[in-house]
Amino acid sequence: MTHDNSIVVENLVREYRKGPRAVDGIDLRVESGEIYGFLGPNGAGKSTTVLMLTTLLPPTSGSALVGGYDVATQGPKVRSVIGAALQEAALDPLLTGRDHLKLQTMLQAIPKAERKPRQEELLERVGLTEAADRKVRGYSGGMKRRLDLALALVHRPSILFLDEPTTGLDPQSRTALWEEVARLAREDNVTVFLTTQYLEEADVLAGRVGIIDHGKIVAEGTPAELKAEIGRPSMHVIPCREEDRPRITGLMERFGESIGSERDLAVRLREGVGLADVIRAMDAEGIVVDDVEMRAPTLDDVFLEKTGRTLEGAASGSDPAGP
Amino acid sequence: MSPLPTQIGALARRSVMRTARQPASAIPPLLFPVALMLLNSGGLKASTLLPGFPTDSFLAFALAVPFIQGALFSTMNAGTDLARDIQTGFFSRLSLTPVRGSALLAGQIAGIVVLGVLQAIFYITTGLILGVRFAAGPAGIALLLLYAALVAVGFGALGSFLALRTGSGEAIQGFFPVLFVFLFISSMNTPRNLIAVDWFRFLASVNPVSYLIECVRSLIITGWDAQALALGFGFAVALAVVSLIAASWALAQRMERT
């Protein structure tokens, strides 16, 4: 195993024939043992980036070193140090969980004597020991994702790529997967490159986050740094009566710029303005509201600031490389 | 020790296991050709009265057909399975392992060969139970199994080529009738020299499937017919070589990995 678990990407580009420039000159660096959250809507270029970094798609130009190996010229060496759970659990519904692990240990050329113990260890780790002999077609989404992760770990990779690992999972399965990924980075010093559409996932798991939009990285930093860039909190108000909306909007816009939301009325408060200032103004005008809330900046605010859209609103179209 | 044999074995095992766990796709290649053979044997029995017909048992004459028909079924099933692997991303998972492209193809085809030989054993056993005597004897049966393996390589590689090119199970299924046309315009039901319609005799004579069938038929009816064996094995080898080259090329195109 190499001691260099880093990912270094410089001006990476992928153009599709007669298609868009899916990845448009990105630069990024992920250090050993770091969890890097790659955030963006469908079609932003996340999956294409992962396919290039995992050697499954040659870059059009630029360079990427994964574990110290060049993805364009040292594919087999890159593959020997990485594990990947790609978008959608790519499993055979007719095989059992144990069959999958057996196949994977053989294909990864794990010595015969180590295969079975490794299979059992991984089944135990992802909590699938009891379901190991059931066909995968009977697995829940969470079980499939956990098996997917176990398969990616068979050869003890030092770098792990997870492409939207929790999409479609229930909150409990999502949390369980987060815990396992965090443990891998913390205890085994595995570098994790994680793509996600979920802001919460990036916030909870990632040490640093890169936001990609239209193939370009538009922001990068720790979640705290990115939120600090936004700085000011937002204020959210739910009116008591629908007819008060225009009046409340007008009032709130005196204290900050509107960051419109369908559910509530919201403004990003100007520097020096506090909750009490707005409440006093509402009181003075006799406005009654159902709820008032101050929110610290979130990654969604960061996304909005950097791209001009909310992540939810931007989630249209699909990544040319993604399913 | 090189991991290559282990990897090929693992992929072949998966291929066989998949088929065994899908009775709906495993049974038709066994039963449908036999059912068609029995039907034809009943309906076309009178053909044996034609002057020059090579045997008085139409069953012995028709027994050659399931070998090729079963191989066609297997081709489609194997191709569909591979296309599904591409569609679901399982192929990408395999591409991320140290497995060489040649091992992926070899593993896939090895699985088809195992199934092809098992099918051949089933057809031979059925024939023996129904009273067919193999003119070439036990050595001929052994050669027949070898031939079945060779034919399975050819058709298996063809199915793999189609899957790798199209990446779509539906496209493979759509191609199935085209392959069956080759079977029906062959000498499957009548010896070529007894086909009275000129254009049909011509098509059957230029159709390689006729020679694939006649090779099997010679071992059952005639014994050791050097010409039929040479033509059958020759076309089977040619099919295998061409299909393997095409499948390897399609694999290289599909597997863009660096």
Image (cartoon, coloured by chain):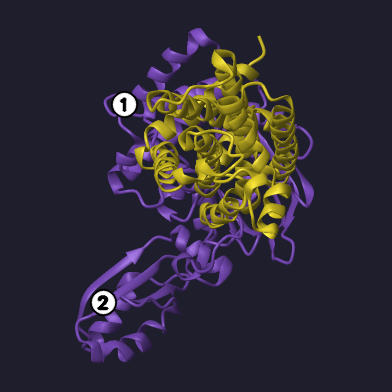
Picture layout, residue B38 above or below residue A21: above
Instruction: Please indicate, yes or no, whether residue A1 appears anywhere in the rendered image.
Output: yes
Marks 2, 1: nearer the viewer: 1
Residue B140 image position (x, y, % from top left): 59, 18
Q: Crowdedness of circle 2 by 10 Å Cα count: few (<14), some, many (20+)?
A: some
- Which of pointers 2 and 1 lies earlier in the amino acid sequence? 1
The x and y percentages for residue B176 are 54, 52
Chain A color in figure: purple
Chain B shade: yellow
The quarter holding residue B229 reads top right
**Left or right: A307 in relation to A287:** right
**In front: B139, or A23?**
B139
Residue A178 seen in this snapshot: no
Residue identified by numbered label 2: A238
Task: Answer with left or right where residue B6 lies relative to residue B231.
Answer: left
Residue appearing at x 57%, y 34% in the figure: B94
State the mark number for residue B246. none
Relative vertical location of residue A6 with respect to residue A12 in this rendering, above or below: above
Name the residue type under label 2. Answer: Ile
The foreground one among B176 and B255 is B176
Q: Which residue is mark 1?
A: A133
The residues tagged by marks 2 and 1 sit, at their Cα atoms, a distance apart of 52 Å
Which chain letter matches label 1? Answer: A
Q: Is residue A78 above or below residue A268?
A: above
Location of residue B154 in the rendering, given as x and y in whole percent from the top left corner: 65, 36
